[in-house]
Image (spheres, grey):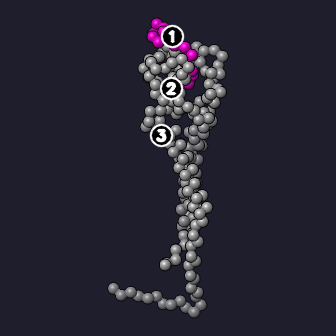
Amino acid sequence: MAATLQNPPSSGARSVAAEPARPRSVLSTIGQGLGLLVLGVIVLFLLSLTVGPLLLPYKALTVYSGSMEPLIHTGSVVIDVPVNAQDVKVGDIVTFVRPDNQNELVTHRVIAIETGPSGRQWVTKGDANSVADAWRVPASGSGYEYSFSIPYFGFVLVWLQSPIGRLLFLVIPAAALGLLTLYELWWPRRAKPAG
């Protein structure tokens, strides 16, 4: 197969040489690297709070009341780890299903351990509360013990679980990806000079 040559440009046409691409500055490269690092840390952090508890032995729960102030603030995310009920001692902070409302989890401090007709029970109290809880928590089996909290981040998680939060969590990245694609299509990268 023979190669064919195109006709040379007519006398009115001009030939435009491609401008050489400017090398990226060191600051630009460092800035881009730091930006990607920060983005990666944020993504890992969000995954550890949302997907991590599904795969690993811990729970991430949002605190809705101030009963454990000043240690655990309203809106904090509490990280709980599994614990055997026999290993819990007075002073430990545990998360349990509220005995009089099976749909509510409570994170309070164990202030006493009693032995009643149904066995061993914890007496619990929120640090900010003036009196102990009205219920007794059965101290049997296993449950979750407070490990640490992330102040105020629960507000972000609650917002992300709302309809508008979910919409924006999906729409903003999709729009950014779309804009990036349009940018790449409309302003293609300049070819590097040969040699």
Numbered disc in front, either 3 or 2: 2
Magenta region includes residue 107:
yes
Give how far apart the Cα atoms at labels 2 and 1 are.
Answer: 19 Å
Q: Which residue is mark 2?
A: 145
Between 169 and 22, the one lying in front of the other is 22
141 relative to 192, above or below: above
The x and y percentages for residue 18 are 56, 78
Give how far apart the Cα atoms at labels 1 and 3 are.
Answer: 37 Å
The x and y percentages for residue 89 are 51, 18
The reply to whether residue 156 is visible in this rendering is yes
Q: Earlier in the sequence, mark 1 or mark 3?
A: 3
Given the current orientation, which residue lies at the most extreme bottom position?
11
Q: Residue at x 63, y 30 (%)?
A: 73
Magenta region includes residue 189:
no
Q: Which residue is mark 1?
A: 114
Q: Which stretch did the figure color magenta?
A: 100-120
* Secondary-structure class at tag 3: loop
Query: How many numbered discs sit on the rendered protein?
Result: 3
Q: Residue at x 54, y 65 (%)?
A: 184
